[in-house]
Image: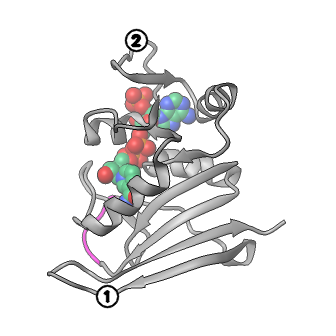
Amino acid sequence: MISVVVAIGNNGEIGNKGQLLWHLPADLKKFKQTTMGHHMIMGRKTFESIGKPLPGRTTIIVTRNKDYAVNGCLVTSSVEEAIEVAKQAGEQEVMIVGGGEIYKQSLPLAQRIYLTEVDFVGEADTFFPRVDTQNWDVIETEDHPSESGHPAWSFKVLQRKK
Ligand SMILES: NC(=O)c1ccc[n+]([C@@H]2O[C@H](COP(=O)([O-])OP(=O)(O)OC[C@H]3O[C@@H](n4cnc5c(N)ncnc54)[C@H](OP(=O)(O)O)[C@@H]3O)[C@@H](O)[C@H]2O)c1
């Protein structure tokens, strides 16, 4: 299965100037739980914004730079190749974790979206593609109120309709 993991603001915003738009520790925890033990596919820019491989997961970086290499990560030259590498390693659910360019190319391939919706509006330069709700069933939903100065957020699991 190919899954996408993403956190979006009220207008689909996901990032600005190479960084995330909010600091939401509870969602970071959710991200960790969702991705733990899996292969994660990310664009080179997202990898560099994180800065290191995340423990307990296999990071596959997508780049056009043939010389790109990072200790502890796999590097591929397309999303399709990254998916194939994960599949060959026996991965049952590969997690596509951004950013904008990679989401755009992989959303059509995904069967599931782990979607965090953050009650945030603000300056952004990177957006998640529009999700056509007609094509997806919401199979799980959790609402979290605003607390300790952090915005309210909800977590949904969307499954592509057959
Ligand atoms: N809110 C969220 O859930 C979330 C999650 C992840 C990231 N983000 C945010 O998203 C932003 C980064 O997104 P982005 O769109 O700028 O960059 P990105 O998707 O992370 O990475 C883009 C890079 O991926 C490589 N790439 C893209 N398509 C490729 C292809 N078909 N073949 C080979 N390589 C390819 C290229 O690397 P080279 O230039 O090296 O060739 C390209 O520059 C940041 O602000 C980050 O914080 C948000």
- Mark found first going from the N terminus, 1 or 2: 2
Give the quarter the ligand 1 occupies.
Answer: top left
Residue 80: x %, y % from top left: 65, 33
Q: Which residues are magenta?
A: 121-125
Q: What residue sits 69% from the left and 25% below the top?
A: 88
Which residue appears farthest toward the top when viewing the image? 67
Residue found 59% across the figure and 77% down from its top? 140
Q: Judge whether residue 29 is colored magenta.
A: no
Residue at x 48%, y 61% (from the top left corner): 128
Helix or strand or loop: what does disc 1 sit on? loop
Q: Is residue 131 above or below residue 121?
A: above
Q: Secondary structure at mark 2?
A: loop
The nearer-to-camera label among 1 and 2 is: 1
Amino acid type at image mark 2: Asp
> What is the number of callouts on the image?
2
Say few, some or many: other residues with alpha carbon within 10 Å of mark 2 (under 14 / 14 to 19 / 20 or more): few
Name the one closer to the observer, 21 or 154: 154
Q: What label does residue 145 carry, if any?
A: 1
Q: Is residue 53 left or right of residue 91?
A: left
Locate residue 115, reporting x and y percent. Answer: 50, 68
- How many residues crowd around disc 1 within 10 Å: few (fewer than 14), some, or many (20 or more)? few
Q: Which residue is mark 2?
A: 67
